[in-house]
Amino acid sequence: MDENIETIASCAVPAYISARILTSGNARITWDSNVDAVRYQIRFKPEGGEWKNKGSMNSFTNVGNLIAGTTYEVQIRSQCVGGWSKFSESVTFRTK
């Protein structure tokens, strides 16, 4: 997804983000839903790595192909009718 998409103040940034490790290579990311959001963009990366992007229509998503014993950073933003929110603050989690 394009990093240069315009953000709008009225589209709330996702909050209360958490990660639950499902297996050594998989995690479930959850957050509070935004009533105005039509979808979400999730980006995640291993420490020192490059961002990978994923979309979701719900307030959760599973991410896979994670490296065991690695710390990951995740950020989420909402897409509303008028545009995108800013990305959330980073949340980190560590795989088993």
Image (spheres, helix red, strand yellow):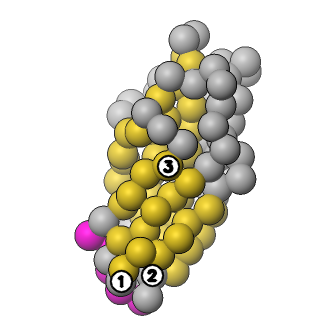
Quadrant position of the C terminus in the picture: bottom left
The residue stretch that appears in magenta: 65-69
* Dots 3, 2 in contact, CB < 8 A: no
How far is disc 3 from disc 1 in space, using C-alphas?
A: 19 Å
In the picture, residue 93 is in which quadrant?
bottom right
* Dots 2, 1 in contact, CB < 8 A: yes
How far is disc 2 from disc 1 in space, using C-alphas?
A: 6 Å
Could you tell me which secondary element the residue under label 1 belongs to?
A: loop
Amino acid type, label 2: Thr
Quadrant position of the N terminus in the picture: top left
Residue depicted at x 56% and y 54%: 30
In the picture, residue 9 is in which quadrant?
top right
Residue depicted at x 45% and y 81%: 95
Could you tell me which secondary element the residue under label 3 belongs to?
A: strand
Say whether residue 60 is magenta: no
Q: In this image, 55 relative to 9: left or right?
A: left
- In the image, residue 68 above or below residue 77: below
Dot 3 or dot 2: first in sequence order is 3
Dot 3 or dot 1: first in sequence order is 1
Determine which of the numbered discs, if any, sits on residue 24 in the image: 1
Task: Name the residue that disc number 2 marks.
Answer: 95
x, y percent for residue 20: 53, 70
Determine which of the numbered discs, if any, sits on residue 96 in the image: none
Amino acid type, label 1: Ser
Residue depicted at x 49% and y 49%: 60
Amino acid type, label 3: Phe
x, y percent for residue 42: 46, 46
Task: Name the residue that disc number 3 marks.
Answer: 60
Dot 2 or dot 1: first in sequence order is 1
